[in-house]
Amino acid sequence: MNISLKHEQAEIVIESPASNNINRIQVNPFRDDLFIPVRTCETRYPVELIKKILEVKGPAYLCDEIVREESPGYVQRSLHYDLLSYVDLKQFSGKRILDFGCGSGASTMILGRMFPDTKIVGIELEESLLSIARSRAHHYEMDSHIELLKSPNGNSLPPNIGRFDYIILSAVYEHLLPSERKKLLPVLWDRLKEGGILFLNQTPYRWFPVELHTTSGLPFINYLPDSLAHVYAQRFSKRNLQGVDWSTLLRKGIRGASVGEIFKILKENNASPVLLQPDKEGSRDRVDLWYVKYRNSKMAIVKVCYYLFKIIKMVTGLVLSHNLSLAIQKKG
């Protein structure tokens, strides 16, 4: 049975076979210039949940939102290595995890599967995204160990949430404006228990030679002052960024993060952060950690980059990769 959903930007066709409970989705855009990262996907989500995601995220990011939660090679793979390369699985048992900026709940559901006996609190500012997350939690019957809360505003946390053993910012930090980073990072740090760990992953490295997140591959834009970077992005990005103001580009994540920036903010607030090094899951440093997540790729450039990054680290001490994966421990 086929179901056709109409949207002003595209037609979405859902093929629902009678036997295996897998819905096949095809997004057919009405305009050729509509950027759609994933046009087709398969999912075990019920049709009502698919409709909810379409309503909130739109057709362009419908399949991307689904596969980021269901595909084992997407967010799940990153979270597995970005967490378990630093901390043994058993050390999460019985602990409290804060998934800050949980969005539509993709990372929260994955954490729920990874750590079924751990209390997970997801926090998000946008109620529409939380509605998807709650529907997902209900779909997976995870309501008992996942709590989803709305932030009161962009610079604070819900009251009386307690303290956490682990705080995770998964593909979140780059979307915070500079002023928000300075305010929120100390607030989050204060909610971390002594000896606890702040994980920051899937955030673009601020000084990588190519900006892959917001502009889809503009070289050297990370080294330009904001005014020139703005013009460069508007004119040459593969995505249609013409007319997009700089504040919006910052919100989209055009300026990633660096260890130096994060540590500067924390130390200005009298914190004593300790940068941990990965030593599990086949990693001995953060270059290895980058590689293990991409080594199954058939692209030869992955291995070339790995050896290049290793040489750069050996010669300069600089850890170079397009995304950061950090574990920062709170010491008393």
Image (cartoon, grey):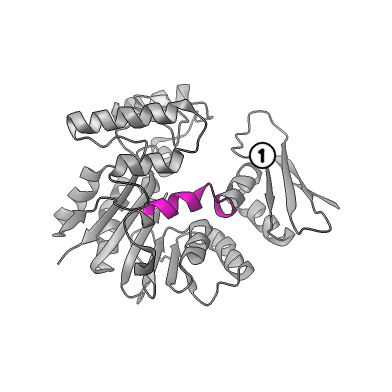
Report whether residue 250 is seen: no
Q: Residue furthest front?
A: 282
Mark 1: which secondary structure? loop
Q: Residue shown at 46%/59% (left/top)?
A: 102
Up-down relation of residue 267 to residue 228 (above or below): below
Q: Percent position (x, y) of residue 294?
A: 45, 39
Is residue 76 covered in magenta? yes
**Which residue, given by chain and number where applicable, does mark 1 sit on?**
39
Q: Is residue 105 visible?
A: yes
The quadrant of the picture occupied by the C terminus is bottom left
Where 24 falls versus 297 (above or below)?
A: below
Q: Residues within 10 Å of mark 1 (few under 14, many from 20)?
A: some
Q: Tell me if residue 211 comes above or below residue 52 in the rendering.
A: above
Front-most of residues 161 and 88: 88
Residue 100 location, x and y as percent?
40, 60
Q: Residue at x 57, y 68 (%)?
A: 137
Q: What residue is rendered at 31% in x and 56% in y?
A: 86
Is residue 268 a member of the stretch shown in magenta? Answer: no
Q: Main secondary structure of the magenta part?
A: helix
x and y percent of residue 198 in the render?
Answer: 30, 59
Left or right relative to 84: residue 107: right
Residue at 53% across / 47% down in the picture?
73
- Relative horizontal placement of residue 278, taking residue 83 as reference (left or right): left
Q: What amino acid type should be assigned to the residue bearing mark 1?
A: Arg
Q: Which residues are magenta?
A: 68-82
Position of residue 17 relative to residue 217, above or below, is below
